[in-house]
Image (spheres, helix red, strand yellow):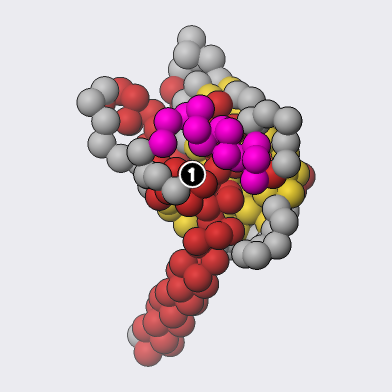
């Protein structure tokens, strides 16, 4: 399975692609951040994030996308920007019909380190160790995206299949409704 992990953010949206399966070695195919300037107007920043994510989807052709679930933070402007970037990631994946899974930060941390309260340094160290790298992917947002991809491969395969089945069922229900409505 090839998974694109996305750590949403307006200034730096972490992206990372990992390939592998449970019980088999994982391979890092790429990691970076899609960047936008805080000086740019919000709509243009969102377009920039969309273009960046689309480029990663085109380049790596993942089987699934894992996005960090937005959670309440004390800084409302930060959570709003994160939520907006997350929405762009979800739309990009949905437009291509890719299964999407949302993982909380603590879920990803627990999958990678064994503790949902691990700090960024611990996550980075374990990502590097799991993938056989000399050091964690940079910037830190990329390492977080890679952690999400690993989490999804290890934990989310079943979640993705359930989500896909739910999407397929919803499509069939809608089709049946439209057919009856004629």
- Chief secondary structure of the magenta portion: helix
**Which residue corresponds to mark 1?**
113
Q: Name the residue rendered at 30%, 40% in the picture.
A: 71
Q: Nearer the viewer, residue 96 or 165?
A: 165
Describe residue 108's horizontal placement relative to residue 17 as left or right: left
Residue 89 image point, x, y percent? 51, 44
Highlighted magenta segment, given as a residue range:
118-130
Q: Which quadrant: the C terminus?
A: bottom left
Q: Which residue is most to the bottom? A: 180
Q: Nearer the viewer, residue 69 or 94?
A: 69
Q: Is residue 164 above or below residue 114?
A: below
Residue 1 image point, x, y percent? 68, 62
Residue 7 image point, x, y percent? 50, 37
Q: Name the residue rendered at 48%, 51% in the picture.
A: 111
- Under circle 1, the secondary element is helix
Q: Name the residue rendered at 55%, 26% in the picture.
A: 140
Find residue 145 and report its image quarter.
top right
Residue 148: within the magenta? no
Q: Nearer the viewer, residue 127 or 161?
A: 127
State whether residue 100 appears in this view: no
Describe residue 76's horizontal placement relative to residue 169 as left or right: left
Q: Which residue is most to the left? A: 74
């Amino acid at each position: 399975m090839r998974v694109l992990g996305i750590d949403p953010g307006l200034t730096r949206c972490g992206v990372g692609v990992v390939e592998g399966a449970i019980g088999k070695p994982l391979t890092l195919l790429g990691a970076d951040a899609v960047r936008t300037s805080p000086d740019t107007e919000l709509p243009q920043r969102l377009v920039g994030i969309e273009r960046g994510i689309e480029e990663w989807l085109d380049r790596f052709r993942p089987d699934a996308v894992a996005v960090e679930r937005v959670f309440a933070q004390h800084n409302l402007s930060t959570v709003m920007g994160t939520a907006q970037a997350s929405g762009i990631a979800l739309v990009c994946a949905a437009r291509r019909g890719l299964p999407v899974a949302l993982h909380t930060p603590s879920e990803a941390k627990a999958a990678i380190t064994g503790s949902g309260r691990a700090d960024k340094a611990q996550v980075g160290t374990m990502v590097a160790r799991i993938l056989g790298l000399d050091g964690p992917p940079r910037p830190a947002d990329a390492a977080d995206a890679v952690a999400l991809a690993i989490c999804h491969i290890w934990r989310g395969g079943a979640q993705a299949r359930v989500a896909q089945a739910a999407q397929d069922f919803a499509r069939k229900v809608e089709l049946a409704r439209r057919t009856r409505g004629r």
